[in-house]
Image (cartoon, rainbow, N blue to C red):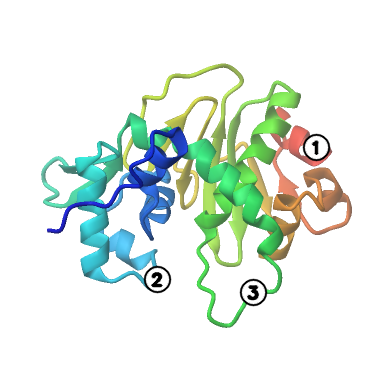
Amino acid sequence: MPPRRSYDQYCAAARALDAVGDRWTLLIVRELLVGPRRYTDLHADLPGVSTDVLASRLKDMEQRGLATRRRLPAPSAAYVYELTGSGRALLPVLEALAEWGAPALEERRPTDAVRAHWFALPLLRHLAAAGAGAGAEGTVEVRLDEGCFHVRLAAGEQSHGGQTYGEQTYGERTYGDGPAPDGADATLTLDAGACVAVSRGELTLGQGVRDGRIEVTGDSVLAKALREA
């Protein structure tokens, strides 16, 4: 293996880019923020990455302490990759990138792939803010035509631990791919266009509900907070 390139600059931003500036690395982090993933899962949800590049990036991430590989308990023989604390700390970086890049999400191009859980990053702050504003906590299931994901919101501070297969904890919020495993306190149904509008700050959750672009179901305090956000 050739030696890794470095910017060789005594700068915090340059050091960070030494670790995560390679093509695909941050998108692998995006996938692992959802929770531990098998190599085949990662490859399926990163359209366009070659097997060689994916394997190389994962190895680099292990060497840099961003991710680890472990075997699932018996009877499963599968291995999964998961983020370390250092890797999980990149959540606000990915959120900021998603917020910065949201204006570029105009009309979807014919070549664009899409996965439902890719909308978790731009929506996460809006859902967390709506819940925090009402002091509400619980699980929100977000349903799109492309699939669904779930977000858990806590009213108080939590540690960065508590990860389970398919889900991770980050401060006051967690999220995972697919339906909420223990049921949802509120269900959000919308399309990708409404997701993008919320992400870009063009539409609030409450406005989307009133305009009929977003449907919130549930009788919980959290569901009411989302309808009124």
In this rendering, the label closer to the viewer, 1 or 3: 3
Q: Find disc 2 in the rendering and name its residue.
A: 47
* Relative side of 214 to 127, left or right: right
Q: Find disc 1 in the rendering and name its residue.
A: 229
Distance from label 3 to label 2 (Cα)? 16 Å
Q: Residue 7's spot in the image, x, y percent?
A: 36, 47
Mark 3 or 2 closer to N-term? Answer: 2
Given residues 152 and 161, the one toward you in this image is: 161
Q: Residue 39's spot in the image, x, y percent?
A: 24, 58
Q: Amino acid at mark 1?
A: Ala
Mark 1 or 2 closer to N-term? Answer: 2
Mark 1 or 3 closer to N-term? Answer: 3
Which label number is shown at residue 108?
A: 3
Q: Amino acid at mark 3?
A: Arg
Mark 1 touching mark 2, by CB under 8 A?
no
User: For mark 2, does the 10 Å Cα neighbourhood hold few (<14), some (14 to 19), or many (20 or more) residues?
Assistant: few
